[in-house]
Image (tube, helix red, strand yellow):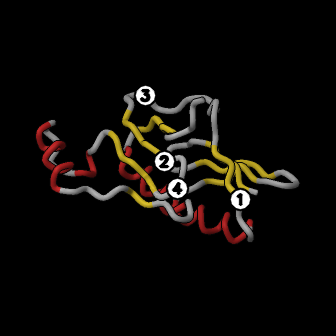
């Protein structure tokens, strides 16, 4: 039987979007770069981790991978994350402070977008 291991998000700038989601989610962090990983990146001609085309956010299950793609997001996501918070209003403010945008409000949840426009819900 298959188990969910990773969620992969296509994006324009993996490092900055990974930082947003690492801050947005409790217990998650951008995976650290050890010397072996930095050496691997340099071998691919990438001198700065900020330019890494794939960035991992870990700390829970599933892990989140952010991978660079050339095209911008154009239409609504076919998959989105649903987040929960004890104090929804405070969490909306916190997420907006990190770069999210409030898109829509409903009776029991709100729809936000991350800095690259990927929708997610909060209840």
Q: Is residue 27 left or right of residue 41?
A: right
Which residue occupies 52% across, 58% down? 99
Secondary structure under tag 2 reads strand
| Quarter where residue 80 is shown | top right
Q: Is residue 44 left or right of residue 100?
A: left
- Nearest-to-viewer mark from 2 and 1: 2
Disc marking residue 25: none
Secondary structure under tag 4 reads loop
Residue occupied by mark 2 = 63
- Nearest-to-viewer mark from 3 and 4: 4
User: Is label 1 in contact with label 4 (beta carbons under 8 Å)?
Assistant: no
Disc marking residue 60: 4
- Nearest-to-viewer mark from 3 and 1: 1
Mark 3 or mark 4: whose residue is earlier in sequence: 4
Q: Is residue 71 left or right of residue 77?
A: left
Q: Closer to the camera, 22 or 119?
A: 22
Mark 3 or mark 1: whose residue is earlier in sequence: 3
Mark 2 or mark 1: whose residue is earlier in sequence: 2
Residue occupied by mark 3 = 71
Classify mark 2: residues with Cα within 10 Å, few (<14), some (14-19) or many (20+): some
Residue 58, percent from left and from top? 44, 54
């Amino acid at each position: 039987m298959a188990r969910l291991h990773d969620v992969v998000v296509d994006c324009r700038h993996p490092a900055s979007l990974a930082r947003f989601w690492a801050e947005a989610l409790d217990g998650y962090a951008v995976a650290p770069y050890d010397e072996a990983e930095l050496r691997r990146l340099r071998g691919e001609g990438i001198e700065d981790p900020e330019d890494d085309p794939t960035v991992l956010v870990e700390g829970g299950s599933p892990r989140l991978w952010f991978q660079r793609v050339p095209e911008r997001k154009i239409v609504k996501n076919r998959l989105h994350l649903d987040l929960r918070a004890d104090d929804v209003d405070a969490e909306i403010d916190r997420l907006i402070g990190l770069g999210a945008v409030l898109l829509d409000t409903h009776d029991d949840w709100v729809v936000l977008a991350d800095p690259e426009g990927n929708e997610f819900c909060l209840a």
